[in-house]
Image (cartoon, rainbow, N blue to C red):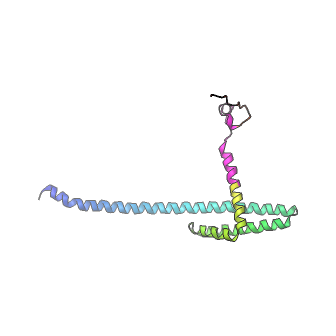
Amino acid sequence: MSESASRERKDPSSLEDVGETIKRESREIAGEAKTAAYRMACDQRDALADYVAALADAAKRGADELESSGYAGSAAAVKRTAGEVGDLVERLQRREPGEFWEDIEDFARDHPVAMFGAGFALAFGLTRFMKSAAHPAPQTARDAQDNPQVNPGVGATPPVAGQ
């Protein structure tokens, strides 16, 4: 039997071995990616829960301020809403990441005013964050001269037409 004939017999099994190795390693990589995605989703869920809990706490403090200013009716409504948002946070933390959207949808249907308020607070916080990140303060006086838009009106000159 020739050497090339014996190689042909070995090649299919070698290819099968390589194919099995690739399949096994692909499953391992997919499993690791799934685990990493799950951990990331849990971290994001916990971060969201912490943020919403902070909003609920701030609302409770605001309700106390309203109450001390003589607005007991408004304070009671804000406290009730903050308590419901706090309950949502507890449910979020007990659920798996994929399940918590159902809780949010149910909560939104049951408490549209609370969701509107939470959405407003989230938009306000996001807007403040975006504004603060949009124009960083200049590091030196030279930076302020090179980039007058960073701090308009302070050392800025209007653009000259044609430049």
Image quadrant in which you'd find residue 151: top right
Task: Look at 37% across and 63% down and name the residue there.
Answer: 24
Q: Quadrant of the N terminus?
A: bottom left
Residue 145 in magenta stretch: yes
Q: Is residue 69 above or below residue 142?
A: below
Residue 88 in magenta stretch: no
Task: Look at 67% across and 30% down and name the residue there.
Answer: 159
Task: Look at 65% across and 31% down and name the residue there.
Answer: 146
Locate residue 11 relative to residue 73 in the image: left or right: left
Residue 130 in percent (x, y) is at: 66, 48
Q: Dominant secondary structure of the magenta stretch?
A: helix
- Closest to the observer, 71 or 10: 71
Image quadrant in which you'd find residue 163: top right
- Closest to the observer, 14 or 65: 65
Residue 85 in percent (x, y) is at: 70, 66
Locate residue 72 relative to residue 137 in the image: left or right: right
Circle count: 0
Residue 154 in percent (x, y) is at: 74, 33
Tell me which segment is drawn in magenta.
Answer: 124-150
**Which residue is farthest left?**
1
- Closest to the observer, 122 or 89: 122
Locate residue 72 relative to residue 82 in the image: left or right: right
Image quadrant in which you'd find residue 93: bottom right
Q: Is residue 135 above or below residue 88?
A: above
